[in-house]
Image (cartoon, coloured by chain):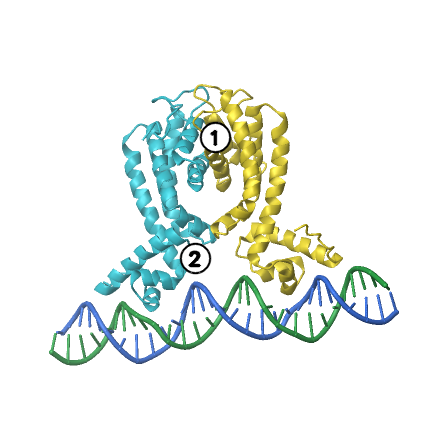
Chain colours: A cyan, B yellow, C green, D blue
Amino acid sequence: MSATVQPMRADARRNRQLILAAAAQAFAEDGIGVPVDEIARRAGVGTGTFYRHFPTKEALFEAVVLEHMSEVVAEAARRAAAVAPGEALLDFLTYLADQGATKRNLVDALAGAGIDVESRAAHFKKALEAQLSELLTRAQARGEIRDDVTLGDLIGLVMGTCQYSNHGASQRRMLSVVYDGLRPSGRPDPSSDSSSEDRPAFQ
Amino acid sequence: MSATVQPMRADARRNRQLILAAAAQAFAEDGIGVPVDEIARRAGVGTGTFYRHFPTKEALFEAVVLEHMSEVVAEAARRAAAVAPGEALLDFLTYLADQGATKRNLVDALAGAGIDVESRAAHFKKALEAQLSELLTRAQARGEIRDDVTLGDLIGLVMGTCQYSNHGASQRRMLSVVYDGLRPSGRPDPSSDSSSEDRPAFQ
DNA sequence: CAGAATACGGAACTAGCGTTCCGTTTGTCA
DNA sequence: TGACAAACGGAACGCTAGTTCCGTATTCTG
């Protein structure tokens, strides 16, 4: 499988990108239900062309999600590098929350449809979790985060705030509550006051 | 519109219940995608019978959701009545979290499909929110809950913990973090220790 | 610039699912 | 118990959306 990818024809490469972009947008806007025809139309190609590039609609989902995850992982790694563990962790989580909120429709739709993106995205997921896990462990060792909280809890809490960030709920305030709750009991917010309205105490 | 419901025939009444029960189970297990045929099969009736009872598949969704919501509202009201506001609020929220976790698939599926259950369920939703709102206001007046938190935040936070209560995340621990975060800064947990019980009771 | 390989477009095919129709069965009431 | 209305079952219909096919257009190579 050394698979020297023989170069695609120029128009083919361009169309592939157009389809991916159109799909990402369409899924985010209208959910997973968008017909293939609609995606093709948005990309300005025919359905035949679509199926030349992706063997199936589900394959397109995968491609879109993988592309997105790889971006997230890269950006997250960049953020995790420099700062002190506690701060870095919250920064990391905040970034994830932003991403989650933005692409919520997409992720929801995929999960809701029971599409097994997990297996293909496992690599990226592992990478993310590894980074988060290290930050969490260090932050806990320093007493900056409750000891009983697990990696899964962390992810669940942050992603949870993405699900309902409308209907009069502010994701900023919800995150602020979560971050307060993550500190060990009796340990006040180390930075500014926590009664912030629309300004999270970190950033 | 005094609508004296002339009594249904015995078999009809029975079948209607069978369909509702089968539907609730089917939606919870397999999502909203289950074909009408499958629901009918589970209920042990034909599709013709199905459509005799519900004019459309969506009407069935509504019926299922409304039934569930009316149960939740009734039980929630019962719990909210007796205790002190702060405690009552958390008890109330915990009950909602339980329900949300149990019926997650159903609610997800409905929301994901963009079905307008809101308009029909508006009455129940209002009732729930009214009760919650009063508890929240009272608890905030007593300084037991952060002042900046809104009703929407509260609901979002609690429902958020329902979304990811697997994959190594414990809903109990997540709720515990949220409840800690809801207290005004520097106010320790008034009740027992806040460390995890390892009895998730659900997963 | 010509020929061949690659890619394109969209009509046509197929499968699944919601809904309707109608001949048959069952419950109810006198 | 007999007759009639109510309810049942499941075959059939039509629509939507995923996929395939093939004649046409475009790009690359010598």
Q: Nearer the viewer, mark 2 or mark 1?
A: 2
Q: Label 2 amino acid? A: Gly
Q: Residue at x 71, y 55 (%)?
A: B13
Element type at marker 1? helix
- Quadrant assignment, res B57: bottom right
- Tag count: 2
Q: Label 1 amino acid? A: Val
Q: Residue at x 59, y 54 (%)?
A: B60
Element type at marker 2? loop
Both labels 2 and 1 in a single chain: no
**Taking A39 as reference, is D2 above or below it?**
below
- Quadrant assignment, res B203: top right
How far from the left and from the top, in percent, is residue A8?
A: 24, 64
**Label ID, residue A33:** 2
Q: Which residue is mark 1?
A: B178
Q: Residue at x 32, y 51 (%)?
A: A67
